[in-house]
Amino acid sequence: NLALVAGIHWPTKVADYRDNMAKQTQINLLSSMAI
């Protein structure tokens, strides 16, 4: 499992990679529900 933690500011390249992988795999990150 992977948990997204609220308040973390990812470096631009890391955030872009994460978002791109989520899009390619059609996985919703649900970042609005981060804890």
Image (cartoon, rainbow, N blue to C red):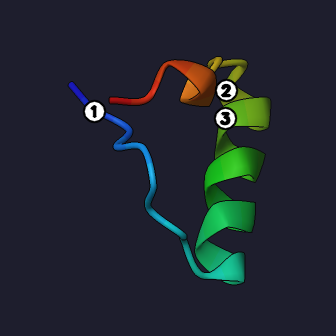
Camera-side mark, 2 or 3:
3
Labelled pair 2, 3 in contact (Cβ < 8 Å): yes
Mark-to-mark CA distance, 2 and 1: 15 Å
Q: Which residue is mark 1?
A: 2
Q: Crowding at label 3, few (<14), some or many (≥20) Cα neighbours within 10 Å?
A: few
Give the numbered dot on residue 22.
Answer: 3
Local SS, label 3: helix
Farthest residue, direction front: 7
Decide which of 22, 29 is in the foreground and name it. Answer: 29
Give me the C-alpha separation between circle 2 and circle 3: 5 Å
The residue nearer to you, when weighing 25 against 12, is: 12
Q: Is residue 15 above or below residue 12?
A: above
Which quadrant of the view contains residue 16?
bottom right
Check disc 2 and give the amino acid type: Thr
- Mark 2: secondary structure: helix
Q: Label 3 sits on what residue type?
A: Ala
- Residue 29's x, y, as percent? 58, 26
Query: Distance of mark 1 from mark 3, alpha carbons?
Result: 13 Å
**Residue at image coords 69%, 80%:** 13
Query: In the picture provided, is 33 more to the left or to the right than 13?
Result: left
Mark 1 falls on what kind of element?
Answer: loop
Residue at position x 54%, y 71% in the image: 10
Residue 26 is at least partly visible in this image: yes
> Which residue type does callout 1 highlight?
Leu
The residue wearing badge 2 is 25
Tell me residue 28's x, y (percent).
65, 18
